Image: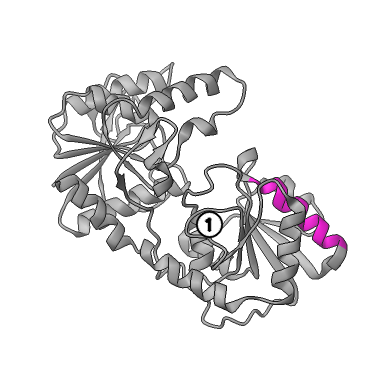
Amino acid sequence: MKIIVPILGKFGNSGGFRVLSKLANYWISSGNEVSFLVYVGSEPPYFPTTADFLYYNKKGNLVSKDQKDASLPLLRMFQMRVAMQTALNNCYADVVLANHCLTALPVKKSVIKAKKFYYVQAYEPEYYYRKTLKDFIFKKISKNSYNLGLDIIVNADMYKNYANLHSTKVVYPGIDLEVFRPALNEESSNEKIIIGTIGRLEEYKGTAYVIKAFQLLRQELGERVELHVAFGEEAMGNIDGVKVFYPNGDHNLADFYRSLDIYVCAGTVQLEAIHYPVLESMACKIPVITTGYYPASIDNAEIVPIKNAEAIKQKLLKIISDKDDVKINKAFEDVKQFEWTHIANKMLNYFKN
């Protein structure tokens, strides 16, 4: 089976791009042919892949990657969507997989003779919440993308019937359980209690509430506790007791999780979705405090309300005083369902049927 995955813009370092690279790798190992269709000016993917690359220029012509004219079009995303559609018209595949709202329309309008799927990894309209022209336009595009008639596959059960997004097909994101694994020596050697989170500026990510909870905790426990923020803004490091880290690649990210005593996720939207840091922390047998995110529950994590720093602080104190090994072990077992081979094969079966 030949599968084309179109990418608009550059490969990022978010979990969604990891999913695409990993899916491609596993599909190829199963004997399929996978190509990413990318703009000729694109940088190599952050997450390694064994897939091939098809390059298109701003006229939609398929070109070699070393073509000199690799400047971005004047209108960027909008002109690139037209170019992507033109490029797809000249490709052959059994399956084309749209994967972002901006790739959905080019896939739909292209005349390529292939099954057309749309893998939705989040309900994107809720992420365009600012009162700007850009967010207004992108919110409209993302909402419309779910009504184009593509065969939609969602990455969490909550999206099967969410707002104007509807699907009967679900494929979770996977996790590499050989990389994200417990420390060989599960006893912490830290003199301090290390709390961790992933730092993001977007309000809905909830990083501000984790920092506030840490500051409240620091008032009680002093220098005994530290907050380690992965991928945070450098300015976060100016806060007393906060250190910022930039783990490069999954192996270093797994080391970051294993260095923690507690991981905190304080996201405020789409709480029944799947959130990689929650999965990865659980796989590393790190106690998790979170506002939700499957498979977190009261049986395997400490659940707190959204936008509530005091509640986070209380859960931190609870774990510090009495770590619940039963919950930690339950979480470790619950993440095994996300093993990559099972995930990749499930989507392949959707493609075949």
Residue at 66% across, 51% down: 305
Q: Is residue 59 left or right of residue 223?
A: left
Residue at 62% across, 76% down: 324
Residue 310 located within the stretch drawn in magenta: no
User: Colour scheme in the image?
Assistant: one colour
Q: Is residue 2 left or right of residue 85?
A: left
Residue 164 at x, y percent in the picture: 41, 30
Residue 210 located within the stretch drawn in magenta: yes
Residue 104 at x, y percent in the picture: 32, 29
Q: Is residue 205 left or right of residue 214?
A: left
Residue at 44% across, 32% down: 163
Q: Which residues are magenta?
A: 206-219
Q: Quadrant of residue 80?
A: top left
Q: Is 260 situated above or below 232?
A: below
Are there few (<14), some (14-19), or many (20+) residues within 10 Å of tag 1?
A: many
Q: Tell me the SS state at disc 1.
A: helix
Residue 293 at x, y percent in the picture: 52, 53
Q: Mark 1 belongs to which amino acid?
A: Pro
Q: Quadrant of residue 109?
A: top left
Residue 218 at x, y percent in the picture: 83, 61
Q: Is 296 situated above or below 18?
A: below
User: Main SS type for the magenta part?
Assistant: helix
Tell me if residue 72 can be seen: no
Tell me if residue 147 can be seen: yes
Residue receiving disc 1: 277
Q: Is 188 situated above or below 253?
A: below
How many marks are shown on the rendered structure? 1
